[in-house]
Image (spheres, grey):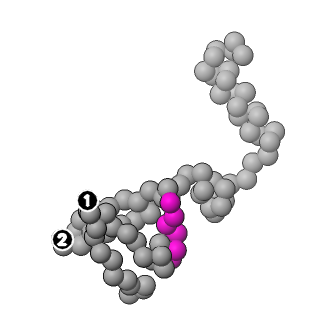
Amino acid sequence: MGLVARARVGRKNMLYIPKRIAEAAGIREGTFVRLRVKGNKVIMEVVPDPFELALRGPKFARTSFEELERESEEMQDELLGGQA
């Protein structure tokens, strides 16, 4: 079942996540989460940060600076009709 902890809902329905749960899930200040209700359960999922994924996530393609520059120039030509 994984890590389990008990938490109490405070004023204005604020829920404080126990430190060991937050650390295990990778939650820190500023982390976005998705909440959904399923029956009588509230399910919380961490929403991946796109910048964090780009820097530290798995890589699935390789490109060189030259390829990136060529692609950029082609898109500029396409968008600006050769005015660039």
Residue 43, by quadrant, is bottom left
Q: Residue at x 28, y 67 (%)?
A: 10
Q: Would you say the residues marked 1 and 2 are in contact, meaning their CB atoms lie under 8 Å apart?
A: no
**Residue 16's spot in the image, x, y percent?**
37, 69
Judged from the image, the secondary structure of the residue bearing numbered disc 2 is: loop
Based on the picture, tell me whether residue 24 belongs to the magenta stretch.
yes
Q: Quadrant of residue 21?
A: bottom left
48 relative to 70, above or below? below
Task: Determine which residue is flagged by label 2.
Answer: 39
Element type where label 1 sits in the image: helix
Q: Which residue does the image show at 60% across and 51% down from the upper left?
A: 51
Seen at 71% across and 34% down, the residue is 71
- Look at the picture and state if 1 lies above or below 68: below
Q: Position of residue 47 (x, y in %)?
A: 45, 58
Answer with left or right where residue 78 lies relative to residue 27: right
- The span picked out in magenta is 23-29
Quadrant position of the N terminus in the picture? bottom left
Q: Residue furthest front?
A: 11
